[in-house]
Image: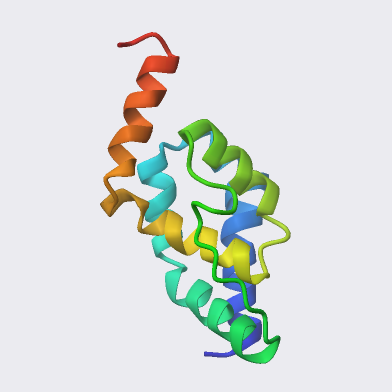
C-alpha cells in the first residue's frame, strides 16, 4: 500500500464525503460505519505505521478517548477529527467505531438516542 494513496483515500472520505458533502448529518450511525469500513485497511495501515515509525505508545481504546456516548456525540467527534485524523488515538477511535456495530454498546447507544428523543 502506498502511503500517499492511502492518505488520499482516508482524507477523501473523512473530509470531502463527510464534511464537504455533509454526509455526517444525513447518515445514520450504521451508514457511517459502512462508509468507514471501506477505508478500514488504510486506517489500519496508518495506525500500525504510527505505532511503528513514530514510536507512539497509546494503548487507549476508542472508549477511553472520545468514547461512543451517543450517535450525536459520535458525529460531532467524527466532524472534529475529519482533518486531523493521523495520530494513533484518533485512528484507534475510528477503527473501534467500525467494530462498534458488533459491540453490545451499539444497541445501548440506539436506546439512549430514542430515550433522548422522547421515543421511549
When asked about the image quadrant of residue 110, the answer is top left
Give me the residue at 32% from left, 26% from top.
111
- Image check: 30 left or right of 19? left
Percent across and percent down for residue 12 are 61, 63
The vertical placement of 55 against 118, above or below, is below
Percent across and percent down for residue 100 are 36, 52
The number of numbered badges drawn on the structure is 0
Front one among 61 and 28: 61
Q: Quadrant of the C terminus?
A: top left
Percent across and percent down for residue 27 are 45, 37
Give me the residue at 53% from left, 31% from top.
72
Percent across and percent down for residue 82 are 66, 54
The vertical placement of 84 against 113, above or below, is below
- Image check: 78 left or right of 71? right
When asked about the image quadrant of residue 96, the answer is bottom left
- Image check: 21 left or right of 36? right
Give me the residue at 66% from left, 83% from top.
4
Give me the residue at 67% from left, 70% from top.
87
Amino acid at each position: 500500500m502506498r502511503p500517499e494513496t492511502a492518505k488520499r483515500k482516508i482524507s477523501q472520505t473523512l473530509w470531502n464525503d463527510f464534511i464537504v458533502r455533509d454526509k455526517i448529518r444525513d447518515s445514520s450511525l450504521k451508514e457511517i460505519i459502512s462508509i468507514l469500513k471501506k477505508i478500514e485497511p488504510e486506517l489500519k495501515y496508518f495506525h500500525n505505521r504510527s505505532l511503528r515509525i513514530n514510536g507512539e505508545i497509546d494503548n487507549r481504546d476508542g472508549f477511553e478517548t472520545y468514547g461512543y456516548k451517543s450517535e450525536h456525540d459520535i458525529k460531532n467527534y467524527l466532524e472534529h477529527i475529519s482533518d486531523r485524523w493521523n495520530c494513533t488515538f484518533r485512528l484507534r477511535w475510528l477503527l473501534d467505531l467500525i467494530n462498534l456495530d458488533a459491540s453490545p454498546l451499539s444497541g445501548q447507544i440506539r436506546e439512549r438516542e430514542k430515550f433522548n428523543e422522547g421515543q421511549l
